[in-house]
Every structure is written in C-alpha cells, then in structure tokens.
Image: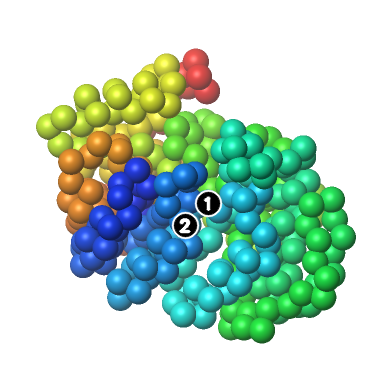
Amino acid sequence: MTTLGAVFLPQLPPERLRAVVRAADEAGLDELWLWEDCFLASGIASAAAALAWSDRLRVGVGLLPVPLRNVALTAMETATLHRLFPDRVHVGVGHGVQEWMGQVGARVESPVTLLREYVTALRGLLAGRRLTRNGRYVRLDEVALDWPPAAPVPIRVGAVGPRTLRLAGEIADGTILTGGTTPDRLRAARALVEEGRRAVGRTDPHPVTVYLHAATGPDADARMERERARWGYDSTTHRAATGDAATIAAEVRRWAAAGADTVVLQPTPDDPDPEGFVRFVAQEVRPLVTATPDGSTGRTCPRPPEESPTATD
C-alpha cells in the first residue's frame, strides 16, 4: 500500500510547526516530512519537536546535507531520535545544494565520494561499531556511539543524477526523489537504483519516496503557476497535482504505479492554511488513495490510466 505524507515547508516560521504537527497527528496523517534547507530551519531540531508534540505521527527528515554535517554528529542525533521515538523517524542524507554548501565553505570537489564515505561510516556508527576511517573526506579515529539505536536504522539517500541514484542503490536503504520528478523519470530512477543494487548483490527492500507538488482550494491553479515559475518548469503536467481530493488522489496513484512506495505531497509556500492542508491529505486524499476498485479500503490501489510521455521526460 502506498504511504501518503505531506511536507512542512521550512519557508514557514518554526513556531508554526507545532500547530501543523498537532493537526497532522489528530487527522491520522501517515508521515510528515521536514527539510533542512539553508538557511531556514534545522532538520533534526524540527524533527525532535515534531515527534515530541505528536503521539503516533511518523516524521521524515529529507534531507540532511552531508557537507554541512560531521558524520559523527549526524550519527549521534539520529541515534538519539531513534531511541527516544522508536519506529517513528526516517532520516535521509544527500549532497545538499552546492551553492549553499559553497556559501558556508563546505563545498567539496567530489560530492559522490563524500556521500559514499559518509553513508558507509554512518551505517557503521548506527550499527554500534567502533570505526577508524582515513578517507578523502571522512576521518574517524576509534569513534563509537555510547548509545547506538536499539534496532537497525535504515538510511535513505536523496538522489537526482545517475551516479548518485546508482550509489543510492548500492549503499542506501531507500531513495528520496525531489519534487518535479515525473512518473517517467521515477521509472528511470528506479532502474538506476536497481543497477546499483545488482552491482553489489543487494536483494533487501529499497523503498522510494517522491515529493509531489500539490495545491487545493479556490486559488490552487494560481499558486501552482507561481510554483512552476519558481522552479523553472516549462509545464506542471506530470509534475504536480492540483484540484480536489479525487483529482489529487488519482495523481498520487499515477506516481505509485510508476514505482513510488511513499508519495509526499508538497504544498506551495504560499498555501494559506498549512494545518488545513495536512488535514486534507489525511482525511480526504488518503481514503481515496487506499480505496480498492470496489470502493472499500484495503491494500490494493487502483492503477491510474497510463500517462503519455512529455517532451521533458
């Protein structure tokens, strides 16, 4: 069954998070995702607060930029969250926006090399191992966590380019795809991830999470047009879902049919009601996504009509 989530955008002030978390938790949202975008909000601090303010809500951080963070610090923070809130947190890592990394003096010559070294070390630390590493970027001298997670922690990697997608398949336990990813690009991304997995003989599950631009309400089309211009898309066709619950649910099923295990609806930064958006996703869209063809709820999602490729695919 497709997992359905929503994003709390860091363009909103941090003090708004509590009300959105409460609304999402009470409405039964599957997952609330947070971003660590420079220079807006901390992913880990926001996740800790969101988890503490909710009773059942699962929280994802997608993603932490690895050039910005020492791997030991990320391991400590991730382990702490998993011990405090077992089975309720997903943490993803990735290259980060290179321009932002340059602004803080953290940009590296080979982001792919850094990511490989980082995820490998992070996996070892979270597994409770004592590590010494002398890599190109990651250096550790007999480092081990005193309080590693009590259970294995999946590590997700945000990826866009072919090299990083193959690397995600090789070293990660899941992949996160950015908003604006079309269904055709999602299929291509899954194929590249599978190439990486086959190269190292991995057969374990590898869930793929994709963000999907979404807007509802009377001004949804105008807001999505501003979002299209902000991201530089030539069109929102097969890049966004705009309209009522039935329309958005049909689009979610389209991305699920293309290979997404989790679809995270990404509201526009100027959405007038962030609390209402998470309620809408949980209470109106989710039942339609999880409905079987006979109208009941179950584990089988109806497949949408096949989309025709666009020029951008």
Image location (x, y in percent) of residue 152:
62, 75
**Which corner quadrant holds the N terminus?**
bottom left
Image location (x, y in percent) of residue 242:
26, 33
Q: Secondary structure at mark 1?
A: strand
Please, is residue 126 above or below residue 104 in the view? below
Please, is residue 40 above or below residue 90 in the view? above
Residue type at mark 1: give it. Leu
> What residue sits right under mark 2 in the picture?
43
Dot placed on the residue nearer the N-terminal end, 2 or 1: 2
Q: Nearer the viewer, residue 194 or 26?
A: 26
**Residue occupying the far right of the picture:** 134
Image-based side of 310 in relation to 77, left or right: left
Residues tagged 2 and 1 counted as in contact (Cβ below 8 A): yes
Crowd around label 1: few <14 · some 14–19 · many ≥20 (10 Å) = many
Q: How is the image coloured?
A: rainbow
Q: Nearer the viewer, residue 220 or 272?
A: 272
Please, is residue 184 above or below residue 1 in the view? above
Q: Quadrant of residue 60?
A: bottom left
Residue type at mark 2: give it. Gly
Q: Nearer the viewer, residue 137 or 227?
A: 137
> What residue sits right under mark 1 in the picture?
63
Q: Does residue 250 appear in this view? A: no
Image location (x, y in percent) of residue 253:
36, 43
Q: Which mark is residue 130?
A: none
